[in-house]
Amino acid sequence: MTTRRRLGLAVVGFGWMGQAHSRSYLRLPTLFEDRAYDVDLIVCSDNVESRRHIAQSDFGFREVAEHWGAAVEHPDVDMVAICAPNMLHETLVTAAAEAGKHVFCEKPVGGTPSQTARAEQACRQAGIITGVGYNYRFAPLVLYAQELIANGELGQITNYRGRFFSMYGADPMGLLSWRFLIDQAGHGATTDILSHAVDLALMLNGPISRVVGIGETFIKERPLPSGAGTHYDRGRPGDQTGDVTNEDYFGALAVFANGSHGIFEASRAIVGPQSQMAFDIYGTEGALSWNHETLNELQLFRTSDPQQGYTTVRASERHPFHGAFVPGDANSIGFEDMVAIQDHELLTAVAEDRPHSAGMEQALACVSVQAAMLKSWETSAWEDVVSLRID
């Protein structure tokens, strides 16, 4: 039997992703028998009393607290999972790092690129192990795509297309929640969803050298929330409105360090695609495509058999991690299974005292691209991608 390290975990923010990761922590022992860790849910911090109650009564956290300091400072906590609103991330990451805790932070690490750069510096200086919530990396067929590319199955990559189209902000009656305000969320589509598309491009196709891009806010006003409404809640005609202060859409051209060219798009206000986090990669020997909306399928083309055209590869236990959830071929897994794989990989890295990817280093690379894109929007010109690392 594998010797396991027991890790005490704290979760800060118990909304959708805080609960998703907590469910994951509870599931991991049933999925990965040969794991290097066991987990204790020590403390959950949230400013909503009903969430604190659920965390303790239904999820089994030993303690709950209204203020995040109880999670960061608790002596039995080894790692803090930060799932609070964007603009709190830098403060929370820095506090956890200074307390010597390992850190998982949902993306975006910061609402702005500079916030992410400061958080990365704090973690690097503290010498802790970090993880960032780029969960689409961990879809079994995305990991399989990475294997195909690394093994040269596609030949030399010539073109890359990455996109994240979501309808969550398509309804003009969607409330003016914090996500639509630059002082509370940071930037809009570039921070919230384009970051996923850029991260996968960096993982699959390597560094990006230059970009040119443009953004737009299509829905410029939204109904004001009467309480603590989210971006999924709706107002009514005649409600008082307020200004949206960050972008709904961003599109960019890119040149990669390997000489290939790319196109990126992200929109939260598009109609049609509902959660289309997708990429298409084209090489001299083949091509492949993946879309989160059909996450258990990969489209693969090989020049060695052109008459076959694109073939559908269906996820199976032969692909990375898939067999931990279901046996056989074409038995589907879902979104929170990707979260579980991600959490398993990070906790394994913490238990084995080694770096994890994607961590703060990868988040810094992602926001360095974002910063160049935003600068290009201002200058209407090509901009070089320059690392935002603070030494």
Image (tube, rainbow, N blue to C red):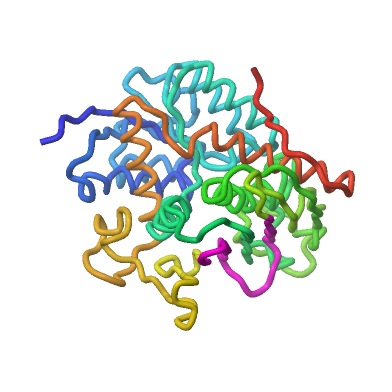
Start-end of magenta stretch: 261-288
Which of 113 and 21 lies nearest the eye of the viewer? 113
For the C terminus, which image quadrant? top right
**Where 128 sits versus 203, above or below?**
above
**Is residue 276 highlighted in magenta?**
yes
**Is residue 249 highlighted in magenta?**
no
Q: Residue furthest right?
A: 379
**Where 97 sits versus 221, above or below?**
above
Residue 46 seen in the figure? no
Residue at x-position 47% and y-position 70%:
302
Residue 40 in picture, x, y percent from top left: 27, 33
Q: Main secondary structure of the magenta part?
A: strand
Residue 124 in picture, x, y percent from top left: 53, 21
Which of 233 and 219 lies nearest the eye of the viewer? 219
Instruction: From the viewer's perspective, tell me whether residue 124 is left or right of residue 77.
Output: right
Instruction: From the viewer's perspective, tell me whether residue 237 is left or right of residue 81.
Output: right
Residue at x-position 68% and y-position 73%:
271
Residue at x-position 22% and y-position 68%:
328
Q: How many marks?
A: 0
Residue 352 seen in the figure? yes
Which of 42 and 24 lies nearest the eye of the viewer? 24
**Where 97 sits versus 186, above or below?**
above
Which of 346 and 91 lies nearest the eye of the viewer? 346
Residue 204 in picture, x, y percent from top left: 52, 51
Instruction: From the viewer's perspective, tell me whether residue 133 is left or right of residue 232.
Output: left
Q: Residue furthest front?
A: 304
Residue 325 in picture, x, y percent from top left: 26, 58
